Amino acid sequence: MTLAAATFVPLLICTTILMHVGSATERPLADPVLASIDARMGFDWLWFLSITNNKLIAPVLIFAYHALGPQVPLVLLLNIATNRNDKILEFVALLAVSSVLAGATMALVPAEGAYAYFKPTAEQFNHFTVQAGMWHYETLMALRSGEPFDLVMAKSNGLVTFPSFHTALGIMVVYALRDYRWLSWPLGGLNAIMVISTLPEGGHHLIDVFAGALVGVASIFAVRMIGAYERVHVDGAARIGSETARLR
């Protein structure tokens, strides 16, 4: 538990600051370009909102979207309970790498989100939450305008629009639980629905989701490469030490 707190809490603070700094840019918003890419792929965001905005589908998507947050402490607590310090550090490393990738990308490609760009009427998303896809907007605009801003960690909201960090995190959570098949498979199904929900509830463009998936996969690949590199050098050092002891 000490290891988890000592690594995760500083990372959470640094990541929150990074996302706010990354949002404070005067670069033009990229939503017209992102929406254009969606259109070229044949995806109509307002149409998708219309078919998901009903009393049967919307509650399922809302649940899946907001069920991702508790999965982060679940990963940590499960590995604490099973004394898997290696898995705790691996998960924190995944969060760190993905945060850097997402922070750099959002600074280069700032976006306000699909709700702010398409401006649907209240009736068009009345089965989703009142602030669907817009809880970040006021803070984002304040940061972009250069207005004085007080960062209160307990009240901070996610600011990443491009890429979809929900998508990246959903992939990384399932990967982090790969040794717990009884849990990873149900969460894999839930997070697949969550990825769909990032469009009408999270207010993401479709291209945001693809970019988020790329961030998640790239983070896993990077952490695996780092782990492999460390194992090679640790095993090499151990063999040298053993050989030296034998010769003595």
Image: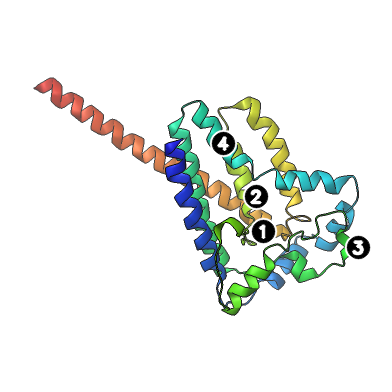
Q: Earlier in the sequence, mark 4 or mark 2?
A: 4
Front-most of residues 180 and 151? 151
Q: CA distance from mark 3 to mark 4?
A: 38 Å
* Disc on res. 75: 4
Please state which of the two labelled residues, at mark 3 or mark 2, is closer to the viewer.
3
Front-most of residues 133 and 100? 133
Helix, strand or loop status at disc 2: helix
Q: Which residue is mark 3?
A: 123
Task: Establish if 154 lies above or below 85.
Answer: below
State if disc 1 and disc 2 touch (CB < 8 Å).
Answer: yes
Crowd tier of the residue under label 2, counting other residues whose Cα lies within 10 Å: few below 14, some 14–19, many 20 or above: many
Q: Which residue is mark 1?
A: 208
Q: Point out residue 140 in the picture as x, y percentages from the top left corner.
A: 63, 69
- Place residue 132 in its image quadrant: bottom right
The residue lying at 57 percent from left, 69 percent from top is: 23
| Left or right side of 87 for 152 | right
Front-most of residues 83 and 107? 83
Q: Which residue is mark 2?
A: 167
Q: Point out residue 89 in the picture as x, y percentages from the top left corner.
A: 44, 39
Crowd tier of the residue under label 1, counting other residues whose Cα lies within 10 Å: few below 14, some 14–19, many 20 or above: many
Q: CA distance from mark 4 to mark 2?
A: 17 Å
The kind of residue on which mark 4 rests is Val
